[in-house]
Image (spheres, coloured by chain):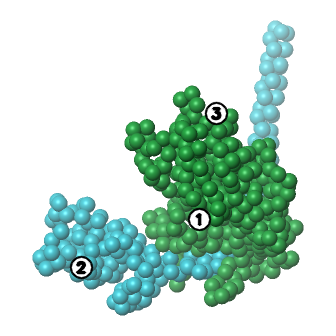
Chain colours: A green, B cyan
Amino acid sequence: MPIPFLKLPYLIQREVLKQLEFDDIFMMSLCSRKVKIMIQSVSINVDKLIYVLSDHAILVSVGYHGRFQRPQDVIILERVEAIPRESRIRINCEIECRYTTRRITDVIKVYLGYLSWEEDMFLKAFQGHMNSLFQNQPDNTVVAGSTNALYNSTGISNVNNADIFIKESDVLNTSQLEDFMNFHPTLNSIHLMFPFTGPPLTSESKIMKINGLSVHNSGQRTSELMANFCKQYLNLTIATYDLNDWKQSLRKWKRKEAYGNLKAVITCTLQPNFVLDFDVFAAEFNLQEWDGERKPKNYRLDTTISHIQSEEFDCSKWFDMQQDGGGKWASILLGPNVIDFVVWD
Amino acid sequence: MTSPASSSEVKYLIESSEGNTFDVSGAALRQSNTFNAMFLNIGADGPIPFTDYNEATLKKVFEYCEHSVNEENYSGPKHQDDLSKWDLNFFNEMDQKMFIDVINASNFLDIERLTSYCCERIARMLRGKNTQEMIKVITLPTAEELEAKQKVEEKKAAAAKKVAEKAAETAEKTETLEELPVQQLVQTTRNKLTRKYLSFSNE
């Protein structure tokens, strides 16, 4: 039964859109300019647009910051050699692309095919179309699973976050990482899921100047990451550090020689024989037990960086330390497998 | 809110666009927020005029309201799969025109439950469809139709331009014709004056 949707009262149109998932709303937005304008008037908000890049395709999803919110797949973009007339649609009234559906393990996936030689134009038009559908400006997150995918990401602009999971067979090196950072000057955070190789990073390396850096399996590169990071959030898992790494970093912070913007360093290690001489440590940094007066009990790690979970730490069992000359306070948790350091504003 | 038993005793007369009137129970009518805002406190002396909607539509809408009087309080949109057999029959027996009239009336009368179910029904028609299929559902012209329409409009515009140009040409010619007698008049007057001046100077 056909319905003259655009002639229905606005409240009805809005209610119908509220009951649709975003993938359907996206398909509707391609119907006509008037439908797109109507969708824009409904004020849809999403926190982020996620572009999952593989060698030949890009999966586009919408996501939210909430911890338990799963991203919702919208469409898969793929390169094609031709666009048959019967499946032709236009993005932003300019670029033609091909619409297809395929059943993959009982789930119907929707594909938009674009001519490979029009990739840059298509991605620009696609991003423009997507962004115009939202009332807010969602963050753009790129997820890359291969070094090829890293280079394929150049068509996507205004990237804020990147999750890079390049496995051992195709190891990422630091120069590729720097290239990637050059392609995307708007990057605000990076999450590296696997170890990387290449020349050592310095405090001048671009990746050290990013607001949020998470390195899973940081291993032997932990020391250089800790020593050279100069922004807000550093998260290192399966890290390999010794007490000296921490001592040097804390000294620089305490003497205000570095880490002026630091908010939190979260680390965990699987080293079985990591030994912490607490008394020496406590004496050097003048660690003090929480007394309930200097600062509140709970520290709220509040960040929109997706790979650094927003959470509240109970710091009553942590130790406090202060920068020289009556500077900022920080709290540190010293555990056998975990050392967390948070700075109070 | 009064209990269904007591509110069903109160009847209101509703007037449709045809001028016909019919009874609706107070309990059913109270599902309309528009009614509640307009008449609940002040009451209604005569028939309540909902004259933007025809009798069949209003009867259909209030049939739904009468049926849902005894249902639990409305708690947000329901998925189509959760609709009762009665609800499904109610929607299935409507044709497209009636369905649209019911949506419009339900929207005007602000009957949350019915409006929400109607919207869910439309959403269901759109879910999982591709752009071309959606265009058919929401009765939009396709790209080809738009192209054809644009061509027709361009032709019309070209024809209108031609007509306008012809009209302008004709107007120009008429202006020249109209100007001729005036020039002749000026010349005649000038000749007369010259003769008069000559005769005066001879005297």
Q: Which of marks 3 and 1 is in front?
A: 3
Residue B73 visible to the viewer? yes
Q: Which numbered dot is residue B69?
A: 2
From the viewer's perspective, is A309 left or right of A260?
left
Residue B21 visible to the viewer? no
In-front residue for pair A220/B191 = A220
Q: Quadrant of residue B41?
A: bottom left
Query: Residue at (36%, 91%) from the top-left corner?
Result: B85
Q: Which numbered dot is residue A255?
A: 3
Mark 3, Cα crowd under 10 Å, few <14 / some 14-19 / many 20+, is few
Q: In which quarter of the image is residue B80?
A: bottom left
Q: In this view, does B181 lie above or below A275?
A: above
Name the amino acid type tagged 1. Answer: Gly
Which tag, 3 or 1, sits closer to the chain's start? Answer: 1
Numbered circles on residues, count: 3
Name the amino acid type tagged 3. Answer: Arg
Q: Position of residue A24 (x, y in %)?
A: 59, 74
Q: Which chain carries label 2?
A: B
Q: Position of residue A187 (x, y in %)?
A: 71, 52
Q: Which chain carries label 1?
A: A
Distance, label 3 to label 2, CA atoms, is 73 Å
Q: Which of marks 1 and 2 is in front?
A: 1
Mark 2, Cα crowd under 10 Å, few <14 / some 14-19 / many 20+, is many
Q: In this view, does B156 lie above or below B18?
A: above
Name the amino acid type tagged 2. Answer: Val
Circle 1 residue? A63
From the viewer's perspective, is B158 left or right of A276?
right
Marks 1 and 2 on same chain = no
Distance, label 3 to label 1, CA atoms, is 41 Å
Marks 3 and 1 on same chain = yes
